[in-house]
Image (cartoon, grey):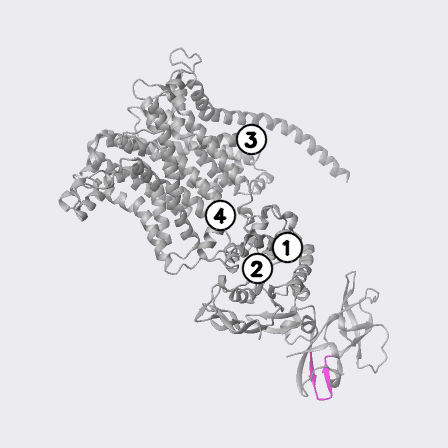
């Protein structure tokens, strides 16, 4: 049985459908991110799981028991969950230790036990030496650690995180991503993580649910999401990509300026009609000599239109010699083609994702 | 390149020259401002302290004044009474204000706008009018509440007696709780709901969250309110004079007043006012210390959105409580005051044949003195407001643009009257300017100067806040196009400030119209103001005319506050300028 199960969950505010029929299941100990642009309904979904917002339609179950339904909901304080807020919501009138102890004290645990568990928890987040500080005396990263400690110390049934890193600066954000994942590996708490930052989601999550306009577009492990995006939105939201449209005639798929054999694709391309593919800029190779044929790939003669050197790689915009299609290609810093030069662009059909 | 560096050198030279020139002008400005402030603040306070140490006739150094002031068991008892009063009011006002502030700021209690309006009404009601209302309500046996009680139970005596310490505490609390309310609710408005959500999700219900998280977060504001209402209570003169004197006990303010009965003993009064001054300074120092610790509001965080807590059926309980406080502070006292104002005899009740407009007719047309008094009040208050705003605007400008060295001294002096109770300030003014060479006693000038000093802090906070909201670049744009500083002030600054200056004017004008504590020591036979006349009428026991005069004062105040909120936006008086 899954730990957390959302079935057909919707939330309507007046005329605005914030969340539109979401289905999602989390196994015990799983870490799932809700990833999407702002306004996609991910925070509303999280607040419905927490019990701060009641769904208009659908149910939320935990361990088979219904927590939320349109007819009534268990209030947040009885869900045994915990949450990390965008503002951290560390209580400034309490010390670090008092903040972390708060949830345990509500659970009628003996003082000695509270003290021991708070001490252990602060140890885990490397905050023991600051236990007596007030939040105003801590840096942003340290406040974040207090928020994590306070949420995890009660061993919640589900841990919810609402864009927890958005208020930190870039380097700290990168450090805390790994910290969150480390804590998850240590405590194995079932976690729902809301973010608009794809890198954050990819570092921390077992699976990612990409949301747009209140719907889940795709739920998958990070690699699959990147390599086999199922929708145009997912392909465009996660990483950079080229969308190219081809027409299939059963044997080969013809694009503007070149064609590829239909059998070379990993997923079944329809025998007849149009098909759209997402091609990552670095899944193509640019070279100055025509590659030897026969490896399933196909080389197309292209002209370089624009280029930019970014240190770690080159960014090229190229166009097949016949046809109007433009494509973004990234190559190693060694591959230096001047603008206007002709080159060979090699496709790898297995890395071209068919968009439905 | 060469051209550029030449330019820079030229600029440099002219910079030094102009700085020298500016130094002269700015020194003059600084001297003028500091002289004005010394006249208004430093001199009266110093004179107060000095004369407490002087012999009445010879002026030589003595401690005799302190001996007389404190060598009397009744005088010491008055000090204790004031302390009891202050603590009582501070606690009761907190009980009134904090639940209301919480309900309005953080819950879905119905009728919020109405309750806010009533708090505002309580705020603009002068404490002595509230006291008179309560005398009519809870005077022994004759008061309305007692009559209702006797009619309901058949008892031969009423159970309420406003002429008691409890009565006095209640009367002052119902007019001073808005301070705590404003402090607390504006602090609560800043607390992000995520603070409460965080406690909820960890297992705390609404009550526990409120007691352990929300209220502790605004403790500094609540303490600020407690301190203000404590200080307000011990410095107040009107309500204690109306209630404590008939009840045959004294507090510091009424005792001070008795030092001014013939023969006037200013030196003893000065000595006796020292604890009031000391306690006030001490309290503000304590408040600063408390606010200085922990960054209470600084950590409320970004993304601090506020959602209202759903109270369910409890929201009606909260509304009931809020309405009870409103009843005690506004409905009941105003009802009986208005009844008395339109009655031939207030004790005869709400019948039609008791209805009359004679009280108003008498005040406005028959009694010449009353007309003069009403005119005086509004004239003095208007001049006071103009004087205070002009002076503080000049100072705020100088401080804000750092035009002179040590400009912060000016700001500090402007705020200093805040820690001087009105009654103490008035005694200082009396000591400094009543005797020759100025001999201002009984003139309109001393009243206006006294009022101006008293409300300087209000004027300064408003002026400074207004100025801070205007980007100096607005003026710099005038300067770079060739306009002088004066032109910039006239064409850009003042027009931009018009609204906030109007607001500041009203914020000074309204308290000036009702000021009693300092007026009572400074008025002469020809400079009486409404508050003093109300006080005199109450001594004659003429409650109908008194109520009519009170109604006139309230109507004028409400009209001006109404105009103010039209111009400047709603509840401008309840906003906290900090």
Mark 3 or 2, closer to the camera:
2
Q: Earlier in the sequence, mark 3 or mark 4?
A: 4
**Picture disc at residue A154:** 2
How many angstroms separate mark 3 from mark 2 (CA)? 54 Å
x and y, in percent, of residue B407 in the image: 55, 31
What chain is tagged by disc 1?
A: A
Mark 1 or 3, closer to the camera:
1
Per the picture, the main secondary structure of the magenta-coloured stretch is: strand
Q: Residue at x 51, y 35 (%)?
A: B396
Query: Which residue was labeled with disc 3?
Result: B407
Residue B571 shows in the view: yes
Q: Is residue B243 magenta?
A: no
Q: Is residue A37 left or right of residue B128?
A: right
How many angstroms separate mark 2 from mark 1 (CA)? 12 Å
Residue A333 location, quadrant: bottom right
Query: Which residue was labeled with disc 4?
Result: B216
Residues beneath discs 1 and 3 located on the same chain: no
Query: Which residue was labeled with disc 1?
Result: A120
Give the position of the N terminus of chain B as an image quadrant: top right
What chain is tagged by disc 3?
A: B
x and y, in percent, of residue A225 in the image: 67, 72
Mark 1 or 4, closer to the camera:
1
Q: Which residues are magenta?
A: A245-256
Q: Secondary structure at mark 1?
A: helix
């Amino acid at each position: 049985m899954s730990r957390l199960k959302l079935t057909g969950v919707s939330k309507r505010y007046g005329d605005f459908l914030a969340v539109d029929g979401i289905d999602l299941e989390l196994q015990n100990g799983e870490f799932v991110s809700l990833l999407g642009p702002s306004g996609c309904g991910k925070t509303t979904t999280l607040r419905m799981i927490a019990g701060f917002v009641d769904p208009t339609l659908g149910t939320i179950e935990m361990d088979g028991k219904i927590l939320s339904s349109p007819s009534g909901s268990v209030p947040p304080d009885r869900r045994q969950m915990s949450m990390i807020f965008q503002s951290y919501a560390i209580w400034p009138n309490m010390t670090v230790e008092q903040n972390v102890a708060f949830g345990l004290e509500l659970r009628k645990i003996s003082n000695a036990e509270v003290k021991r568990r708070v001490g252990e928890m602060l140890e885990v987040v490397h905050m023991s030496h600051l236990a007596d500080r007030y939040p105003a005396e801590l840096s942003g990263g340290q406040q974040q650690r207090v928020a994590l400690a306070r949420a995890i110390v009660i061993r919640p049934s589900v841990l919810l995180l609402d864009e927890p890193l958005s208020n930190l600066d870039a380097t700290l954000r990168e450090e805390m991503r790994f910290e969150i994942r480390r804590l998850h590996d240590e405590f194995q708490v079932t976690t729902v993580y809301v973010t608009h930052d794809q890198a954050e989601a990819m570092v921390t999550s077992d699976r990612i649910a990409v949301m747009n306009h209140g719907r889940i577009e795709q739920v998958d492990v990070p690699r699959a999401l990147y390599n086999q995006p199922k929708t145009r939105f997912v392909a465009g939201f996660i990483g950079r990509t080229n969308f190219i449209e081809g027409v299939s005639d059963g044997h080969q798929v013809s694009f503007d300026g070149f064609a590829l054999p239909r059998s070379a694709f990993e997923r079944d391309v329809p025998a007849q009609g149009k098909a759209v593919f997402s091609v990552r800029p670095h899944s193509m190779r640019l070279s100055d000599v025509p590659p030897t044929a026969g490896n399933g790939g196909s080389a197309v003669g292209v002209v370089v239109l624009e280029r930019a050197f970014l240190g770690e790689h080159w960014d090229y915009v190229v166009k097949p010699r016949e046809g109007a299609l433009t494509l973004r290609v990234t190559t190693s810093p060694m591959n230096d083609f001047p603008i206007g030069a002709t080159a060979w662009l090699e496709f790898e059909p297995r890395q071209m994702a068919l968009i439905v | 390149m060469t051209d550029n560096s030449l330019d820079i050198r030229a600029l440099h030279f002219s910079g030094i020259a102009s700085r020298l020139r500016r130094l002269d002008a700015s020194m003059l400005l600084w001297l003028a401002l500091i002289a004005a402030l010394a006249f208004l603040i430093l001199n009266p306070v110093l004179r107060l302290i000095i004369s407490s140490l002087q012999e009445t006739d010879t002026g030589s150094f003595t401690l005799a004044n302190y001996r007389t002031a404190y060598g009397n068991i009744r005088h010491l008892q008055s000090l204790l009474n004031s302390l009891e009063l202050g603590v009582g009011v501070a606690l009761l006002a907190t009980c009134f204000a904090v639940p209301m502030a919480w309900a309005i700021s953080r819950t879905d209690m119905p009728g919020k706008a109405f309750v806010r309006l009533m708090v505002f009404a309580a705020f603009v009601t002068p404490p002595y009018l509230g006291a008179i209302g309560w005398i009519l309500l809870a005077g022994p046996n004759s008061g309305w509440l007692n009559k209702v009680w006797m009619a309901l139970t058949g008892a031969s005596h009423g159970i309420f007696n406003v002429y008691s310490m409890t009565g006095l505490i209640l009367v002052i609390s119902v007019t001073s709780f808005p301070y705590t309310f404003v402090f607390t609710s504006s602090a609560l408005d800043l607390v992000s709901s995520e603070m409460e959500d965080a406690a909820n999700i960890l297992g705390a219900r609404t009550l526990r969250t409120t007691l352990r998280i929300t209220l502790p977060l605004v403790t500094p504001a609540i303490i600020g309110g407690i301190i203000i209402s404590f200080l307000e209570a011990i410095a107040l003169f009107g309500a204690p004079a109306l209630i404590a004197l008939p009840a045959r006990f004294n507090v510091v303010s009424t005792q001070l007043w008795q030092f001014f009965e013939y023969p006037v003993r200013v030196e003893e009064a000065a000595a006796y006012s020292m604890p009031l001054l000391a306690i006030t300074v001490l309290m503000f120092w304590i408040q600063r210390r408390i606010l200085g610790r922990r960054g209470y509001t600084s950590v409320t965080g970004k993304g601090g959105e506020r959602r209202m807590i759903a109270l369910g059926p409890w929201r009606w309980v909260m509304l009931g409580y809020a309405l009870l406080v409103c009843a005690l502070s506004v409905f009941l006292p105003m009802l009986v005051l208005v009844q008395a104002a339109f009655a031939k005899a207030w004790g005869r009740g709400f019948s039609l044949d008791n209805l009359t407009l004679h009280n108003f007719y008498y005040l406005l047309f028959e009694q010449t003195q009353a007309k003069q008094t009403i005119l005086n009040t509004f004239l003095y208050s208007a001049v006071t407001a103009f004087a205070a705003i002009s002076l503080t605007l000049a100072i705020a400008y100088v401080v804000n643009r750092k035009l002179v060295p040590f400009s912060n001294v000016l700001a500090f002096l402007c705020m200093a009257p805040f820690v001087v109770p009105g009654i103490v300030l008035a005694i200082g003014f009396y000591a400094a300017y009543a005797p020759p060479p100025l001999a201002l006693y009984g003139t309109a000038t001393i009243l206006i100067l006294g009022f101006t000093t008293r409300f300087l802090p209000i004027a300064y906070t408003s002026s400074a806040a207004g100025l801070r909201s205007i980007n100096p670049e607005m003026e710099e744009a005038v300067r770079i196009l060739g306009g002088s500083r004066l032109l910039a002030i006239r064409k850009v600054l003042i027009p931009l400030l018009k609204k906030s200056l109007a607001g500041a004017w009203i914020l000074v004008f309204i308290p000036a119209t009702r000021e009693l504590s300092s007026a009572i020591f400074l008025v002469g036979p020809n400079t009486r103001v409404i508050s003093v006349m109300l006080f005199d009428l109450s001594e004659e026991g003429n409650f109908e005319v008194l109520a009519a005069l009170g109604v006139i004062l309230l109507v004028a105040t409400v009209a001006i506050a109404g105009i103010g909120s039209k111009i400047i936006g709603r509840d401008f008086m309840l906003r906290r300028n900090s």
